[in-house]
Amino acid sequence: MLSVIGQDQATNSVLTFLARWPPKTAKRALLLWGPSGTGKTLLARELASEKQLDLIEVNASDKRSAKKLNELLSGTINQSSLLNKGKLILIDEVDGLSGNGDRGGIGEIVKVVKKSSFPVILICANPYDKKFLPLRNVSTPIEMKPLSDSIIEKILTMHCNKNNIPIDPEKIRKETASSKGDARRAIISLDSGTTDQKDNKENIFKAIQIIFRSKNATEIRNAIKNCDKSPNEIFRWIIENINTEFTTPSSRAKAYEILSQADIMQRKHKSWINHLLKFSQIPRPTSFKYYKPPAWFFPRKETFDFNAHCSQRKLTRERAYMQFLD
């Protein structure tokens, strides 16, 4: 029986939606929303497993444009799987899209929902942002509420039993108190061996340097735990700065492979910190590096179309300088 601890009401709503598929209304998708660590993605994955559906999972913040989303989903929303099983389309982190600035990404998701022959689940933190109005018109919002302390304690105890970690009731209580209803945060904190302290936050730039260069797993755990960014945000910072830290094609390929393995383990709620230790084993210059925020960190500038008399060769050569023009 499908069950995500502490989210019985949301679980029942999702099961009802699937039992009544296809719907007779315009709202052909579910919009799971709520703060981080409340089980939104887990619920969708457990639903696919329980109902033996092929899960097609897309991270909207990675596929920001309409073109990329269309390329990824157009061939799957109406085609049956090889084993003739049903499908569940999961579009995670819809918050990563920023309205018109992401080149039609939200509009493309609306088209996917309308055209899909299979159920679609969307995930975000706050569906009532005005930019999500088109999505609310085609989906039913279901809230995933912050987890209570008793539920967090139960989840941490289960995590310890599953991973053969000695149970320390006092430590579990401390991690629960600092989790603020975020189970993922509590698990990461428990695994790292540190308790969240607001007055001891690690600067993201320092944390990235430690992740790339440290050979000490505890130091990496503490850097991630004490950083003022979430694990998902830290992953994006790492992606943005791999080409800065590693300068050769072979070293970059190794770095992306390491990050991919760590991401898979983190999404499965398994130990992933040790994978990051492998960054330090990749040869690279030890000179100072200036790390930069991910592209989405800065607001997008308004762009204009204009006609110009310019050869294609010259345009290609000078395109890099156009960003500095007013």
Image (cartoon, grey):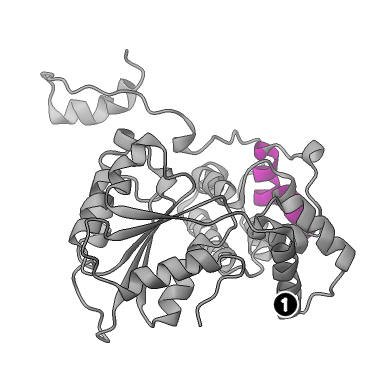
Horizontal side of residue 184 vs 214, given as left or right = left
> Residue extending furthest bottom?
83
On the question of residue 264 being in view, the answer is no
Q: Residues within 10 Å of mark 1 (few under 14, many from 20)?
A: few
Q: Is residue 38 left or right of residue 105?
A: right
Q: Inspect the magenta stretch and tell me whether residue 218 lies in it.
A: yes
What number of labels is visible? Answer: 1
Q: Residue at horizontal 70%, vertical 36%? A: 203
Residue 117 position by quadrant:
bottom left
Which amino acid type corresponds to the residue marked 1 in the rendered image?
Answer: Asn
Q: Is residue 216 magenta?
A: yes
| Mark 1: secondary structure | loop
- Of residues 108 and 270, the one nearer the viewer is 108
Q: Which residue is mark 1?
A: 163
Residue 222 appears anywhere in the view? yes
Q: Position of residue 171 (x, y in %)?
A: 86, 62
Q: Is residue 69 above or below residue 1?
A: above
Seen in the image, is 121 located left or right of residue 84? right
Left or right: 74 in relation to 264: left
Compared with residue 305, is residue 39 higher up or lower down, i.e. above or below?
below
Residue at point 46% right, 70% down? 12
* Residue that sits furthest to the top in the current view: 326
Q: Is residue 206 above or below residue 242?
A: above
Please give the name of the residue rendered at 32% of the width and 12% of the height, measured from the top-left corner.
Answer: 326
- Residue at (50%, 43%) from the top-left corner? 240
**What secondary structure predominates along the stretch shown in magenta?**
helix
The foreground one among 103 and 319 is 103
Q: Residue 174, position in %: x, y?
A: 83, 56
Question: Start and end of the magenta stretch?
Answer: 204-223
Coordinates of residue 152 in the picture (x, y in percent)? 71, 63
Q: Find residue 218 and report its horizontal and vertical position in percent.
A: 79, 58
